[in-house]
Image (cartoon, helix red, strand yellow):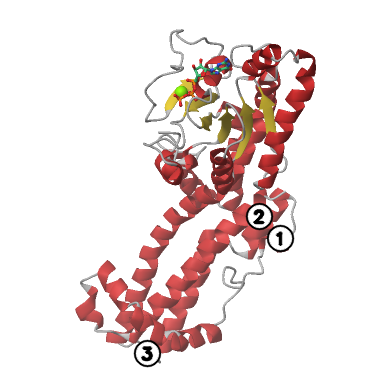
Amino acid sequence: MGNSQNTLHHFFNEKEVKQCVVIYNEKGFCALVSCIKEKLVDLEHQTLHIAVTGESSTGKSALINAMRGLRSGDPGAAEEGSLEQIQVPMEYQHPTLPSVCFWDLPSIGTSNLPTNKYSELVNLNNYDFFIIVTGNRFKENDGFLAKEIGKTGKQFYFVRSKMDIEIDILKKQNRLGEREKEFDKIRESCTRSLENDGFPSSKVFLVSSYYVDDFEFCRLSDALKSELNAIKKHVFFLSLPKFITAVIKKKKSVLHKLIIAAAIASVTAYVAPLPGPSLIYDVCVLVGMFVYMRQNFGLNEESLKGLATRTGKPVKAFKTKDKKSVMSDITIMSAATLTTGLAAAAIKVSDEVFHVIPNLSPMVGGSLSFLSTYCILKNVLNNFARSAVQVIMKAFES
Ligand SMILES: Nc1nc2c(ncn2[C@@H]2O[C@H](COP(=O)(O)OP(=O)(O)OP(=O)(O)O)[C@@H](O)[C@H]2O)c(=O)[nH]1
Ligand SMILES: [Mg+2]
C-alpha cells in the first residue's frame, strides 16, 4: 500500500541507500551531497502519490475519474456510488502526468474505519500529498483529517465537490442570480473552518466532477500541475533526515564492529600487560580510534572545509552548537579523564556487550579496560553519527 512498499524513504529505495553508503565511504561528504543533489534535480521523474480522502459518498472516486479524464463505467475508472465501501486504498495512474499516482482511500468515519482508528489503519505516512473531499458542509472529520495530515508535515488541497447540485438548488429557489455570492459563502465557510483548525493558508477548490469546464475544476488541475515540482521538493526535504539517518546507520554498524575490536585490543594489553601503565595503552587506542572515526565520518577539519567550499557556506555553519553532537577535538588528557570517569558507566553496558560477543565474557571477566574502552568509543560513535546527519542536513539548508 502506498509508496512505502516501493521506496523506503519516499524518493530513495533500499538500493540507493546502499549506493550512497558506498559513495560516502569511498568519496566522502561532498560526493554524498552531490549524489543527493542529483536526485533533487531528477525529481520530475519521481512519482508523487496523492491520496484522496474524506467522508463516505463525498465524491472521492468521481473526482479521481474526472482528474483522469474518465467517466464512471469507463474501463479502468474507479467505481462511483458503490453500495459497498472500499476497504483498501486503490491506485490510479494519471494518464498524462506519468509522475502522478492517485490513491482512492477508504472513507473516514465508517463502521470499518472509525475516525479514531483511521490514520493508523490507512497509514497517512505512505502518501506524499492529499486532497480532502467534502460533499457538503465542512465536517468535524474534515478538520480531523487536516490535523492528521498536518502531523505528517505533508500538504493538502481542500475540495468542496458536487457544486452542480448547489446550482440545481439555486434554480429551484429561483436564486440563480446569487450564484457567485453563494459560492463565496461556501468558500469562506471552508476557509474559515480550516483556519480555525490551524490551517490559515489552505487552498480550497469548489468543483463538480461532472462539469469539469465549470466551477473550479480547471483551477484545481492547473494548481496541481504547476505546483507538482514544489510539492515534490517539499516531500523530498521532509524525507531527507530519515534517508540520511539510514545511510549513517549503515556506516555506524561497520564502525561498531571496529570499536569492539579496539576494545578487545585493550583487553589484550590488560591480560598480557605491555610495557608501561595499561592506561596509556588504552588512551592510545581511544585517540587512534577517535581520529579514525572522525575522518571516516568526514568530520575532520579538512573534509568540512571541502564541504564548505562546495556548498558556498562557511566552515562554522557545519559546526553545531550542540555539544552532545559535535566533538571538535580530543586530547590524551581528556581521554584519560573519560577512561576513569566512564568506568562506572562501562560496567552497566557489560551485558549488552557480552550479548554481542558472548565468547568474550570468560576472557574479560569484567575487565574495566575492555568495558571502559568500549563504552567511550560507542559514545563517540553515537556523537559522530549524530553530527554527520546534522552536517549533511546543513549542506541542504537554504
Ligand atoms: N451531482 C454530482 N454528483 C456527484 C458528484 N461527484 C460524485 N457524485 C455522486 O455522489 C455519489 C458518491 O460519489 P463517489 O465518487 O462514489 O463518492 P465516494 O466518496 O468515492 O464514496 P465512497 O467511496 O463510497 O465512500 C455518487 O452517486 C456520484 O454519482 C458531482 O460532482 N456532482
Ligand atoms: Mg469511492
Instruction: State the quadrant of the N terminus.
Output: top left
Q: Nearer the viewer, mark 3 or mark 2?
A: 2
- Check contact, mark 1 vs mark 2: CB within 8 A: yes
Q: Label 3 sits on what residue type? A: Pro
How far is mark 1 from mark 3, CA to CA?
44 Å
Q: Label 1 sits on what residue type? A: Ala
Residue with the mark numbered 3: 275
What number is the disc on residue 346? none
Q: Secondary structure at mark 3?
A: loop
Q: Nearer the viewer, mark 1 or mark 3?
A: 1
10 Å crowding of disc 1: few (<14), some (14-19), many (20+): few
Q: Quadrant of residue 210?
A: top right
User: If you read the primary sequence from the N terminus, does the residue marked by circle 1 or circle 2 appear first?
Assistant: 1
10 Å crowding of disc 2: few (<14), some (14-19), many (20+): some
Residue with the mark numbered 1: 317
What number is the disc on residue 394? 2
- Check contact, mark 1 vs mark 3: CB within 8 A: no
Q: Secondary structure at mark 2?
A: helix
Name the one closer to the observer, 384 or 30.
384
Q: Quadrant of residue 320?
A: bottom right
Name the one closer to the observer, 139 or 104.
139
